[in-house]
Image: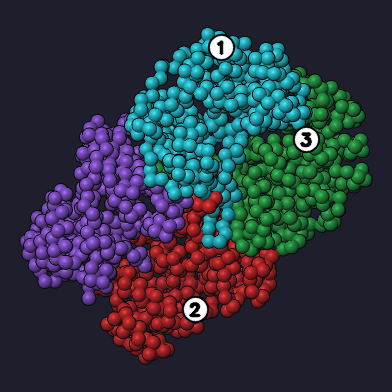
Chain colours: A purple, B red, C green, D cyan
């Protein structure tokens, strides 16, 4: 039987995921929606031709017996409340980042889920479902490069608008690396530091861009992450792990090779949607399939959301202090150790 | 409403497509099946947990009012009969290659479809849905390289078994290039020639391997296609189009780059399923979406199946004659000119 | 003691080689020059500040006791006469291609050299000294790819002037592939065929461009060589050998990688001098070192010049006949079998 | 007239450079040698068949009127004394790194040279003559990537022996990046920091390996340099400069591409001699040509040697302090500003 989704928040991202579930994936239906803008919610249901109830708020939606899984795509500050109610009701939750806007909020979720006794929550960190990262992870796990010692990565956007602020480099941009890097090497962060190279004249006055973030993990791996959101030339995600016996590197996005006008070249993507479109599909399909087949999600957990929150907060502190900031995290509870992404056979 | 599929032939390929339709794609259901082995057909329905009738033969299945589209995955010699019956009944057809085992059979289908007055048939040439070929096609259509003058491509498999015969190099292997190359450059074939390089000692005694096929198109483009089915090192599909002002080349399959043991390398795929898995999904989804949204399929038509058949026959003659064999094709009827694949926004 | 060079022909190519010998290489001096334009010859001597006699003709130069090696860079029709005189005098000869303008002329040289009893002549086929080709040769000789079965290569120039004629595609352009390909795979040519793809609109009216040349070797290797001298985008030399167990491919010319304006790219060279500059230096240095250290040259021999001539003639016939033209060559005499280029340790 | 070289120190490196000057380069002769081991010096002269005096010490050699340029390839601690004597005598000097073993020593040389009133000294930093670095430099100088903001580079060796100590990572290995990076971006260092990632189990107990060095320049460029001398897989030099509008990256060493055994690969060099062999040749040839044609060397100056010394010392302090160490350098005197490497037309 298909997994019945109730959607909380039918804005742009919510709509995109609704289309994905309806048109690209299998094993799930959207059976209920709600939004602070009730009219919007109703219109989307019509537009997508869904057989779905429109509820007045998240509580009513969660209590709808057809809803087995709640998709939380409301604005960030509302996430925590909805997730906690869904956990209490024993419903599965797919929540877009952030899990909650504060570390304390994330802790409350982690505690509630453990009390419930079962993994219910998956956070929308889709990079773990990207074929390139999965290949890197597999190589590292198979000891292909020996112990990982260093990581270097880049997160580059062609440009950002006026509303993009310096802290968003950590909380909105780097947040994906924060989730991916510790997962990739199977280690926890110990500290974070932010340094500011010479500023690009293409960045607006209020924004520090580029930034370089240095992580150290508990076992001593050093990771340099470049964030450069006005790089001009394209959307460019790079990642390289240097181990005792070798190096693995994220593949370039495949693109037709050409020779023309004195150049041997390849086009670079300009937008992130194309870059991680497959990963988004795989992430949701895995959430649906894991619940349908194994009774619980296996992707990034609320603990991973908690790690991202604590690490992001430390990163923002480090932006101001320009010092090494310690990342204080309790040991991962056994409850969250069983999580293991098996590569979904697409 | 979902498109109701009736499946004729529930062997290995049929099952794979049934899983695809059921688990990976949206907008379609399998509502009926039949197979010469009735027990097998019934078992599959149970195994996939389908709500589908098991019919005694293709005629009964085609007449099932729930069946809107017939998926033909029986063995090759049975294709023509089923396709003709489906056309007569005004049902849509997705038929795996070959459309029919003889050019005359293909002609009968083409004629029947035109008499029916509407495009009903799509042939399973999935490469046109591969992202790399689509990028090449787009570049060529946008005049990025000027007029195409030459094409070179390779179709390499690591090895083949005892049942693979010399003519299969044309009819089973090259058949994909036959469909793709004329589509890519928007031209028709004029002649075909086969030459045999020094034989690989890895090929079995009865098999000529490798083979080089030379096409000339009506406008004079020369295309060299290497077929090498015992190349040992991997499954490797290459294609390069050289135009008046530049060259475009199929991207390599993306793979994690590594440095280890004195080598900077990338793994090569060993099997074709992984290579074209996305293309298979896109092909079927496009068939479903086109019918659901536009009322007819827009992928490779029965005319394309006919071209492949005539060209394949000429290729087999060329294998024996070792001469240039003319490919005699009537002009493409207007009926088949409207076909235009728009890149499906995955 | 340095090898004393006498230069016959002080035009553009002669001057370039003179500068090379004087300024880039060691172990040789230019001790004598001659040219039909005596004034030119004298001026060059002054300009390069050489301590060299200016002779009235090639005979006088060859008889100069200081001349140990003759560099023949006069115009093509004069080559044969000078080379024969030098052989008769027992002098070493480095002759730019062509060895002679007719196959009969080449035969006379081959005969004369054998009668002299010692290898004296090297022909200016510099590609054998290119690091990329040498690496390919080494891999093939070490059986890294098993038996070679197929070769494909391209010789592309951005554009050519009005004086470039259709036959020059064979005699001036392909001549380098003619020498390189048989050397690379250690085999002899059996036949040659020329086909004309659709003509580029960028080529002048009198010129057939591109052309595709197909060689078959005695052991059955099939080689496709594309000649495209108005490709617009750059000077681009490619070569790929497909063997029973693998493929080797000429490296791209190293160039700084960049990311800019939506492109991940590398600049393509526009001129051949840069492409093969190191090969020219290595070729001459090897000629000098081999004579100084081993008493005879070990590079491309007059037999190789003869092969190129016979093959080139067959190629020009094939341009007209558009048929497969047989390449009739006697077996390589033992005298020319000892030739083996050892990679000079630069 | 050829430049007469006097060689001080005829050990391994001295001999290599002597062979280079004699056999690969033009415009110079070795006219005198000396070594603490007089017998060795005499033997080399015989072995290389040189017409060169063997002097009892550097003073006598410098006073030899045939010596116009002194090649200093003795052991490090002896460099300063020889260089100072040569400057006093008005002779040109090519000195292998280090210019002197202390910053004070370098300062004395810099002062002496300025008092002499003319550039006499070139330090053996050959990377500035590597074609890849030169292309990067050219791109940066031409504003191809806008203002440089960040640099990341790697210096990897397959392994090192027991005598390699932690400080040698800075003084022997990183010293090349120290010279190259500031030259590449046209800026001066402000500070240096060393961090130690998790240690490789392949490194010997006494050695910290890998190390990451962070430079900040006066204009704010941040540079990360990885030193990893037990990386196992090969000798691997990488460098990437990220600017406001684009990125440039050192080319990979060209190597035959292959497909075999499931891998698309390229061999990685194992030794540094091959990697920078051309650069060594170009460096010396430029030293010779600049003196012969312009009357003074134009390569890395004693000021560059002084920068390297001060920076290296700060690096070693930073290894111990694990703090940011300030690099205190006076402004570059006008005397050393004229230095500008023009790409030698090889």
Residue A192 spot, x, y in % from top left: 27, 42
Q: Choose mark 1 or mark 3, whichever is in front.
A: 1
Which residue does the image show at 69% across and 35% down from the upper left?
Answer: C281
Q: CA distance from mark 1 to mark 3?
A: 39 Å
Disc 2 is attached to a residue of which chain? B
Q: Position of residue C216 (x, y in %)?
A: 72, 60
Out of B28 and D21, give the one closest to the viewer.
D21
Left or right of D295 in this view: C343: right
Q: Which residue, given by chain and number where applicable, does mark 2 sit on? A: B100
Is residue B95 found left or right of C184 in the rendered image? left
Q: Tell me the quadrant of the picture where the N terminus of chain B can be found.
A: bottom left
Q: Which residue corresponds to the image point at 45% horizontal and 56% vertical from the top-left? A: A144
Q: Is A140 placed above or below D252 here?
A: below
Residue at image mark 3: C288
Residue nearer the viewer, D108 or D19: D108
Q: CA distance from mark 3 to mark 2?
A: 68 Å
Q: Is residue D95 left or right of residue A155?
A: right
Residue D174 in view: no
Q: Secondary structure at mark 1?
A: loop
In the image shown, does D163 or A232 lie closer to the viewer? D163
Which SS class for mark 3? helix
Residue under pointer 1: D118
Q: Nearer the viewer, residue A164 or B146?
A: A164
What is the secondary structure assignment of the residue under circle 2? Answer: loop
Q: What is the C-alpha distance between the residues marked 1 and 2?
A: 87 Å
Q: Quadrant of residue D326?
A: top left
């Amino acid at each position: 039987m298909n997994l019945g989704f109730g959607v909380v928040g039918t804005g742009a991202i919510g709509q995109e995921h609704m289309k994905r579930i309806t048109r690209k994936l299998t094993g799930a239906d959207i059976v209920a929606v709600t939004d602070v803008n009730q009219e919007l919610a109703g219109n989307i249901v019509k537009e997508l031709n869904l057989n779905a109830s429109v509820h007045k708020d998240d509580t009513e939606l969660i209590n709808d017996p057809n809803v087995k899984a709640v998709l939380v795509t409301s604005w960030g500050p509302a996430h925590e409340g909805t997730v906690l109610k869904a956990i209490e009701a024993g419903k599965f939750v797919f929540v877009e980042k952030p899990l909650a806007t504060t570390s304390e909020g994330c802790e409350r979720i982690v505690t509630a889920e453990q009390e419930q006794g079962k993994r219910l929550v998956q956070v929308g960190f889709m990079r773990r479902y990207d074929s390139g990262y999965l290949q890197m992870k597999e190589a590292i796990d198979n000891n292909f490069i020996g112990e990982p010692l260093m990581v270097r990565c880049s997160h580059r956007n062609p440009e950002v608008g006026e509303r993009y602020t310096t802290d968003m480099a950590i909380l909105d941009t780097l947040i994906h690396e924060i989730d991916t890097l510790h997962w990739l090497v199977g280690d926890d962060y110990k500290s974070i530091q932010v340094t500011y190279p010479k500023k690009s004249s293409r960045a607006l006055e209020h924004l520090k861009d580029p930034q370089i973030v240095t992580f150290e993990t508990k076992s001593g791996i050093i990771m340099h992450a470049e964030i450069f959101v006005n790089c001009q030339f394209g959307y460019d995600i790079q990642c390289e792990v240097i181990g005792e016996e070798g190096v693995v590197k994220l593949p370039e996005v495949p693109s037709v090779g050409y020779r023309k006008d004195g150049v041997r070249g390849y086009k670079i993507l300009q937008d992130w949607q194309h870059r991680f479109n497959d990963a988004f599909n795989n992430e949701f399909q895995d959430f649906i399939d894991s619940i349908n087949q194994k009774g619980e999600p296996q992707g990034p957990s609320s603990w991973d959301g908690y790690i991202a929150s604590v690490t992001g907060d430390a990163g923002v502190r480090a932006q101001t202090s320009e010092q090494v900031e310690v990342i204080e995290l309790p040991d991962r509870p056994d409850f969250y150790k069983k999580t293991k992404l098996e590569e979904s056979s697409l």
